[in-house]
Amino acid sequence: MSRELCIMACVFCRDWAFQDWAHEQIRDRCLVTENSKLSGHGESMTKAFILHICQVSSRNDLDVDADAARRFHELVRKPFLEWKESH
């Protein structure tokens, strides 16, 4: 089993730029009211953000669930990289 997306998600969660981007996404989408784990800032918040957006219970699921992998690419990875390039 490949762990490529799980590892990428873990790296993103430790990245300060990703933490800033995820914090903006949570604020803009008013997600804190839906999931209290999304409050605050830092690695635990970004992990909760990825799990919530990708509809998984573990980042490991990104490598075994094709729909979760698609959500990760379309809703997390691509928008984050585009945001990062513009900042």
Image (spheres, rainbow, N blue to C red):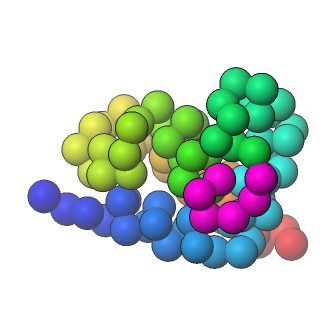
Q: Is residue 15 left or right of residue 61?
A: right
Identify the residue shown where x is 38% and y is 51%: 59
Give x and y (percent) for residue 49.
61, 45
Q: Is residue 76 left or right of residue 67?
A: right
How many marks the image carries: the answer is 0
Q: Nearer the viewer, residue 25 or 47?
A: 47
Q: Is residue 4 visible?
A: yes
Identify the residue shown where x is 31% and y is 65%: 4
Residue furthest toward the left?
1
Identify the residue shown where x is 76% and y is 34%: 32
Q: Is residue 62 visible?
A: no
**In the picture shown, does residue 11 fall above or below 75?**
below
Q: Nearer the viewer, residue 16 or 82?
A: 16
Give x and y (percent) for residue 74.
55, 43
Identify the residue shown where x is 37% and y is 68%: 7
Q: Nearer the viewer, residue 69 or 9?
A: 9
Q: Quadrant of the N terminus?
A: bottom left
Q: Is residue 64 left or right of residue 70?
A: left
Name which quarter of the figure residue 21 lies in: bottom right
**In the picture shown, does residue 1 fall above or below 11?**
above
Which stretch is magenta?
A: 40-45
47 in the magenta segment: no
